[in-house]
Structures are given as C-alpha cells and as structure tokens.
Amino acid sequence: TRIPFERAVDELKLSKTRIEKEINQEIDSFAYPNGQPGDFDIKIVDQIKKSGFRSAFTLISGPQSYKSVLRNPYQIRRIFLSHKDSFPKFVSKVHGLPRVLEYLGGGAE
C-alpha cells in the first residue's frame, strides 16, 4: 500500500516467478512486507489470490484460531521472532505469554 498498486502487482509477480525459478518449486504462501494492517488492503489481498497464492501471513499479533485461518487464509497472524530473542523469550512468545500480558493490561516486549 506504500507504492502504486501497479508496481506492487509487478513486484508480486516478478518475485514469485524468480523465487520459483531459483528453488525449482512452486510457492503458494506469501508474507506481507512489514505485515501490519496498513501494509495491505483488499486490492492487494485480491491480487495475491489471483497470483496463485493459497495463503498469506501478516505480522498482526497472534494467536489465531484454526477456524479463523480457514475462513481467511490471506490474513494469517504470525508471531514476530527476533534474532535478539533469548530462548526463554522465544518460548514465552510461542506459548502466547506476551499476548496474555497485553490482554491483562501488563504489556510485554
């Protein structure tokens, strides 16, 4: 959404083609650059579907129910993991602790 739509479509198609050529395998999943709600819209989601992707991942805070993923496979939430995360922090993120703390009003990094 930060570049003209036509350019986004071109980049999407060229990137998919290049990756598939380099790995000699079809790809069917997409990850939105930056992945926040303002980084994609209905036009982009529609183009991703038309490009042959079967799912797309955001960086909107998770977790998400399996039923929700099945209803909308083009806005799947994912957990942001950093190379700076310690193993205990990784484990807490995977288990949803930051989300629980956020829900309880305690906040989490």
Image: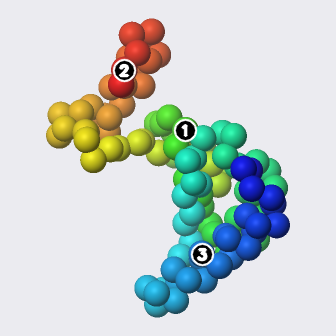
Closer to us: 52 or 68: 52
Tell which residue pokes out farthest to the front in this image: 3
Is 35 on the left or on the right of 23, as rendered?
right
The three-letter code of the residue at mark 1 reads Ile
103 lies above or below 7: above
The image shows residue 72, relative to residue 90, as above or below, that is below
- Do the residues under discs 2 and 3 have CB atoms within 8 angstroms? no
94 or 85: nearer the viewer: 85
**From this viewpoint, which residue is outermost toward the top?**
105
Choose top left, top right, bottom left or bottom right for residue 100.
top left
Whichever of callouts 2 and 3 sits on the residue coming sooner in the sequence is 3
3D distance between C-alphas at marks 1 and 3: 23 Å
Quarter location, residue 106: top left
Image point 32% across, 34% down: which residue?
Answer: 93
| Marker disc for residue 15 | 3
Amino acid, disc 2: Ala
* Residue named by callout 2: 108
Instruction: Sort mark 3 into few (<14), some (14-19) or many (20+) by Cα contacts within 10 Å.
Output: few
Q: Which mark is residue 60?
A: 1
Q: Quadrant of the C terminus?
A: top left
